[in-house]
Image: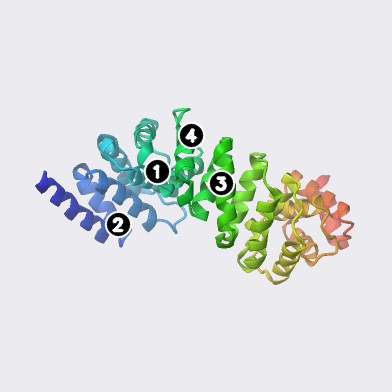
Amino acid sequence: GAPAQHGAIALNKEIIVAARAEGELVRLITQRAADFNHVNVATAMHRLARVTRNRGDRLQGETRSAVGLLDKQCAKIVGDLVPQGVANYLWSSATLGRAPPASLLLLLTGHFTKLMSQLKPQNISNTIWALATLHVPPPDRDFIPMVQTAALREIAGFKPQEISNMVWALATLETPIDRDLSHAISARVGQQASAWEPQNIANLLWAFATLKEKTDPRLVEALLDQGARTIDQFGPQNISNTLWALSTMQIKPPKSFVDAISRRMDQMSDPFKPQEVANSLWGWATLALPGHSIAVIKWAQQSLRLVSHFNNQDTANVLWSLGTLQHHPDAALMTALCARIV
């Protein structure tokens, strides 16, 4: 009734105020979780995920207990959640790095399937991204086909990040993209190519390559033209994933993008991780790009810094790439790489 609704609205305001500090929010959840309605549960979980976002181990002591109380209350009121509530709850669980209990996950995904006609792009993208991030396949095998049908219906409203996250999630869950949805995604990406940011470009290409999607080279070229324009925002992982994806799909990038990568590598101070260096070199060599490029010189320098952290695959990829590119690194790197093999 009206009094209960007014109480829930007042409680939501308390949650938002308390969310300025983790301790205050945890205390409020601990004291009042049993009174939360569907809006309060989703809001509290979302705010808890955000307030702990920059901490390494987010779920310690009382915070972990508070999440448990929210899970318990969510199971009681799950049937009242709107699509955004389900999406926010699962997104928050993934951001906190903790999957809901299996029984609650079954309730949440089961309820979500009943709301298919109401789904919007952000609901679809956040929900499937959360499941993939948690490495939790949906309990119901019809769930993803139903979500893909909803995505096809709503494709005209998808923003670049929502497409990127959805396709990345499908690839991570090792689920092929429905053919009609794949065509619709390509058309939508083509319309928006000039609005795509580096991480979204890299994630989409990585997903297409991982799923062995037949990708229109013109679509890839449009994305890479945008990549060249935004190259200053490309980080090591973006570069590595993009080159790995292009080489896996056997699509040679336009010269503008190749030159842009070299310029970026010449300026970049961000350190690469071992696998990022190895994959970047492997992609560059597989695509038969110039071996004398400044990018190759920089990756060779990074390899010397990282060689003690290379695993066998990294070492093999770097050696093969340098040989294929006919790039002759200094003796210190060759000695260190050969020592990793022995």
For the residues labelled 2 and 1, say whether their Cβ atoms are less than 8 Å apart: no
Q: Which residue position holds label 1?
A: 90
Mark 4 or mark 2, earlier in chain: 2
Type of amino acid at the residue the image marks with label 3: Ile
Where residue 261 sits: x, y (%)? 72, 64
Q: Earlier in the sequence, mark 1 or mark 4?
A: 1
Nearest to the eye among marks 1 and 3: give it.
3
The residue located at (57%, 59%) in the rendering is 196
| Marks 2, 1: nearer the viewer | 1
Tags 1 and 4 in contact by the CB under 8 Å rule? no
Q: Residue at x 69, y 56 (%)?
A: 221
Q: Secondary structure at mark 3?
A: helix
Q: Which residue is mark 3?
A: 185
Kindly report which numbered mark, 3 or 4, lies closer to the viewer in this rendering.
3
* Label 4, residues with CA under 10 Å away: few <14, some 14-19, many ≥20: many
Look at the numbered discs 4 and 2 and tell me whether their residues touch, using CB distance below 8 Å.
no
Residue beneath disc 4: 144
Front-most of 314 and 174? 174
Question: Which of disc 1 and disc 2 is earlier in sequence?
Answer: 2
Image coordinates of residue 215 in percent, x first then y, are 67, 45
Q: Nearer the viewer, residue 116 or 212?
A: 116
> At label 2, which amino acid type do we have?
Gly
Dot 1: element: helix
CA separation in Å, label 4 and label 2: 37 Å
Residue that mark 2 sits on: 23
Q: Nearer the viewer, mark 1 or mark 4?
A: 4
